Amino acid sequence: MKWITAIIKPFKQDEVREALTAIGIPGMTVSEVRGFGRQKGHSELYRGAEYQVDFLPKLKVEIAVADDQVAQAVETIRAAAMTGKIGDGKIFVSPIEQVVRIRTGESGPNVL
């Protein structure tokens, strides 16, 4: 099992959700986060004053998938979240040692 964490632009949320649902991934966790990478923020104009925005709004999408779904899930997220411009985000894949369904106590890949 793998844990996939994707940092994406906020306006791409619906596209990513719909694309993952279409390939059979039933759920995800989405958090609003702020950060920057190579983009290093940008400047904005507010009431005639220019100011620097260092931390940009992003979404963190987290999903747990079986090992055989990893490549398809990563490519699906990449394709759905891509704008071709700087700041599109990153996808991280990490191993999961164990999963336990709280309601029933079941564990293992079948609880995903």
Image: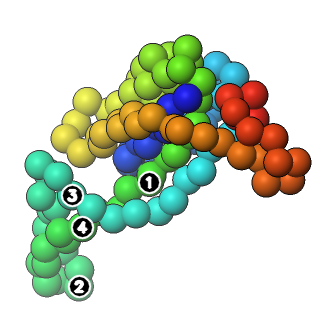
Which label's residue is closer to the chain start, 4 or 2? 2
Q: Which residue is mark 4?
A: 55
User: Which quarter of the image is occupied by the N terminus?
Assistant: top right
Going by the numbered disc 2, the residue's amino acid type is: Arg
Q: Is residue 26 above or below residue 22?
A: below
Distance from disc 4 to disc 2, alpha carbons, whole Å, reads 20 Å
Going by the numbered disc 3, the residue's amino acid type is: Phe
Residue 85 spot, x, y in % from top left: 22, 36
Side (left or right) of 86 relative to 95: left
Q: Secondary structure at mark 3?
A: loop
Which is more foreground, mark 4 or mark 2? 4
> What's the residue at 23%, 80% (across, down)?
46
Q: Which mark is residue 26?
A: none
> What's the residue at 19%, 41% (across, down)?
86
Q: Is residue 86 above or below residue 31?
A: above
Going by the numbered disc 1, the residue's amino acid type is: Leu
Q: Which residue is mark 2?
A: 47
Q: Which residue is mark 1?
A: 59
